[in-house]
């Protein structure tokens, strides 16, 4: 399991520098590499648009 970024991403860039393992990539919508994400939750806590969550 890994956190995922939804279509609510506004590409603000806040999350990318907060990920301790470099799992987040830039783009029109940012993307989390599920092979690298350790589920720490830091990115979800800093996203201003609540675009990052664990899939159900
Ligand atoms: S949950 Fe943690 S490890 Fe996973 S992408 Fe977010 S900041 Fe990175
Ligand atoms: S912090 Fe949220 S809105 Fe900003 S780039 Fe990351 S996922 Fe997108």
Image: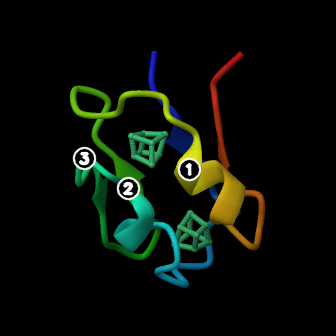
Question: Which residue in the protein does label 2 denote?
Answer: 19
Above or below residue 38? Residue 42 is: below
Question: Which residue in the protein does label 1 denote?
Answer: 42
Q: Is mark 2 within 8 Å of ligand 1?
A: yes
Whether residue 5 sits left or right of residue 35 in the image: it is right
* Residue at the image position 23 percent from the left and 33 percent from the top: 36
Q: Which mark is residue 21?
A: 3
* Mark 2 residue crowding within 10 angstroms, few (<14) / some (14–19) / many (20+): some
Mark 3 or mark 1: which comes first in sequence? 3
* Residue at the image position 38 percent from the left and 55 percent from the top: 19
* Contact flag, marks 3 and 2 (Cβ < 8 Å): yes
Q: Is mark 3 within 8 Å of ligand 1?
A: yes
Mark 2 or mark 1: which comes first in sequence? 2
Q: Quadrant of the C terminus?
A: top right
Residues under labels 3 and 1: Cα distance? 11 Å
Q: Residue 9 placed where, x, y %? A: 61, 67
* Contact flag, marks 2 and 1 (Cβ < 8 Å): yes
């Amino acid at each position: 399991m890994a956190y995922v970024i939804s279509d609510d991403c506004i590409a603000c860039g806040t999350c990318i520098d907060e990920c301790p393992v470099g799992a987040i990539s830039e783009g029109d919508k940012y993307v989390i590499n599920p092979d690298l994400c350790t589920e720490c939750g830091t990115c979800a806590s800093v996203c201003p648009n609540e675009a990052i969550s664990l899939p159900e």
